[in-house]
């Protein structure tokens, strides 16, 4: 039925789609976290989101953050569904244009902070299959400069990498991401500004892990 919804949205105009945007967002929010991470299912969620953006255009403005998150979730599947993730990246650019932003970078700049805070709030419950972990990773990699003013929010999350009681996959993902952040010119300076915290809360504790623990 998601395929049917997508097909109908793709054939409708602004007047038909605009009044349904909030309900469609509810549907997508429920389904995107429960459907398997396979192209067979996720492609229809992407079609629904893109159908709304194409048909409703500027009427997506009040719901831009919800559409942004939906696209970000699919963009986060770049390792398993690269083609679909690439289409989601193009979708973020289309959303930016629809809601009056000059480009995708501008949309990231306005939305990345609140989304980052919402994602980081659940960090202590993350497991290897947590959508929020993928969103955090994707936000920092794709948002880059847009995350610089909000880098302080990332410190407690990265500190979880030093907790040897947590899921090894979560810890290794955070450490690999931190390595990426330190090599990103747009994030290097805010990272250096919080260097003392990163050293004391993340790097030094990691280096002191006891033999037998998973790095």
Image: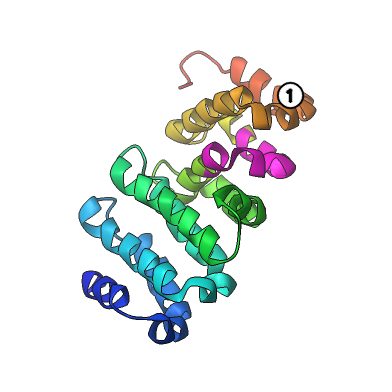
Task: Give the x, y percent position of residue 195.
Answer: 75, 25
Q: Nearer the viewer, residue 205 or 6?
A: 6
The answer to whether 206 appears left or right of 10 in the picture is right
Q: Nearer the viewer, residue 60 or 72?
A: 60
Neighbourhood count class around disc 1 (C-alpha, 10 Å): few under 14, some 14–19, many 20 upward: few
Which residue is pictured at 39% across the width and 86% down the height? Answer: 16
Which residue is pictured at 55% across the width and 26% down the height? Answer: 180
- For the question of whether residue 81 can be seen, the reply is no
Q: How is the image coloured?
A: rainbow
84, above or below 7, in the image: above
Start-end of magenta stretch? 139-158
Which residue is pictured at 57% across the width and 71% down the height? Answer: 61
Instruction: Report the number of numbered marks.
Output: 1
42, above or below 55, in the image: above
Task: Give the x, y percent position of residue 77.
Answer: 36, 45
Q: Quadrant of residue 164?
A: top right
Task: Give the x, y percent position of residue 145.
Answer: 65, 39
Q: Nearer the viewer, residue 204 or 54?
A: 54
- For the question of whether residue 9 can be seen, the reply is yes
202, above or below 51, in the image: above
Most common secondary structure along the magenta stretch: helix
Which residue is pictured at 57% across the width and 18% down the height? Answer: 209
Task: Give the x, y percent position of residue 90.
Answer: 42, 51
The answer to whether 30 appears left or right of 159 in the picture is left
**SS for callout 1:** helix
Q: Which residue is mark 1?
A: 200
Q: Quadrant of residue 157?
A: top right
The answer to whether 34 appears left or right of 25 in the picture is left
Q: Quadrant of the N terminus?
A: bottom left
């Amino acid at each position: 039925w998601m395929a049917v919804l997508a097909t109908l949205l793709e054939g409708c105009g602004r007047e038909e789609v605009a009044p349904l945007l909030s309900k469609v967002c509810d549907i997508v929010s429920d389904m995107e976290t429960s459907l398997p991470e396979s192209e067979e299912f996720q492609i229809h969620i992407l079609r629904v989101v893109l159908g709304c953006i194409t048909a409703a255009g500027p009427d997506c403005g009040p719901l831009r953050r919800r559409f942004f998150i939906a696209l970000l979730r699919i963009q986060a599947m770049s390792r398993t569904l690269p083609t679909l993730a690439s289409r989601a990246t193009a979708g973020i650019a289309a959303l930016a244009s629809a809601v009056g932003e000059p480009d995708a970078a501008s949309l990231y700049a306005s939305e990345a902070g609140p989304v980052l805070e919402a994602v980081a709030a659940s960090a202590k419950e993350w497991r290897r299959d947590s959508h929020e972990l993928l969103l955090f990773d994707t936000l920092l990699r794709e948002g880059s400069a847009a995350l610089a003013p909000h880098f302080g929010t990332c410190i407690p999350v990265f500190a979880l990498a030093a907790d040897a009681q947590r899921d090894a996959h979560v810890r290794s993902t955070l450490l690999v991401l931190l390595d990426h952040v330190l090599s990103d010119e747009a994030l290097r300076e805010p990272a250096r500004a919080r260097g003392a915290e990163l050293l004391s809360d993340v790097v030094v504790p990691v280096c002191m892990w006891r033999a037998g623990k998973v790095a």
